Image: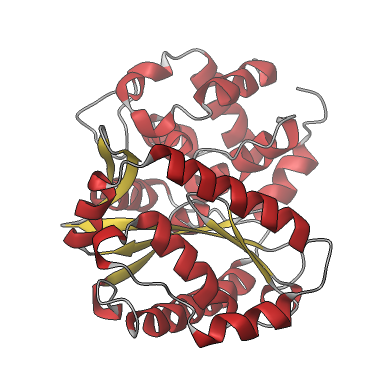
Amino acid sequence: MRGISRKLIESIAEEDVSEFADLVGEKVTALCSAAINELSLSVPFVNIDKTILQPANEIFNGGISAESEYIYFLAVESPQIEINCLQYNDFWKRFKERFLYAWNASKKKKRKKRKREAQQEEANPYNFQAEKYNLDKLISDLQIAISHNISETSIVYNEGRNLKVIGIDDFGPNTKILIYPVLYEDGDYKFLISRKKGFYKMNFDNRTRLISDKFERVGQNFVKMIKIMNALFRNSSRSFVRPNQIYIESLLYNTPDELFFAKDIYSVFKNIINYLNFSNVLEFKSVLNPDITLAKEKAIRSNMVVFSKLLSSISEIQ
């Protein structure tokens, strides 16, 4: 990979946006709390006391940078919504609703209708139907509720499985907030795959414990290496693919502790990249579930191949 220099690696490692990230986190927490409180007045399945806002990407591990997105799971504990998700099977009706939403959304971008639409929604913003209230409807209602609690210069996009919030006045320029409404049960964050296949579960308990243990053993160089890998991935990827934090954390967790100790961060970087390039990383243990290898970890398949190509392109650094 061209363009990698000591100066670049050191600048990435020393970048500190923690104060800004903390402020964004506080604003997102307040925004989601206000939206859930508002929604709970109309939807009996939603309650602020049974809702969790969980940082999901590098804001979880501390490897945040100026280019980072702010990704959260907004987890709602609701057995009834889960049942409704599995019962909802009107594929063509759902397809038609999605198509009409996308069509209307594309037309809205061409006209300034935000205030007029908000006024229309205020009369009856949430069409609550108990027998059909599922994650799709929850995401749609959260979009409305969040829009009520941000400035008029901000925009909330419904991207199907998640909400994207962009607002210069609310969060600052180039700051992208992604909120994934999911279900929650006994520590598991549950993502709906389909009515037949049910939910994919993700639990952060092992992740929290393992990366905390690694940080205690090797110190700040662990977080610095996460930032470096994220930055190199974003700069090298031609398509918009997010660096998978579970994969990066697993790679670094399985890297021998002694490689994190060197005279400077560039030497640490060289040692670790060389080690990974000569290792069978598919045999590494997952930080989500240390009982399985990365070869069997479903949570990393989205960009494991792309990241592997990045490591290979860096090759053996001298």
Residue plotted at (30% across, 79% down) = 48
The x and y percentages for residue 167 are 71, 71
Residue plotted at (60% across, 38% down) = 229
The x and y percentages for residue 61 are 45, 54
Residue 218, compared with residue 19, is above or below; it is above
Residue 190, compared with residue 78, is above or below; it is above
Residue 318 in sight in this render: no
Which residue is nearer to you in this view: 76 or 175? 76
The N terminus: image quadrant:
top right
The x and y percentages for residue 293 are 29, 23
Residue 168, compared with residue 248, is above or below; it is below
Q: Quadrant of residue 277?
A: top right
The C terminus: image quadrant:
top right
Which residue is nearer to you in this view: 159 or 223? 159
Residue 45 relative to residue 26: left or right: left
Residue plotted at (28% across, 38% down) = 195
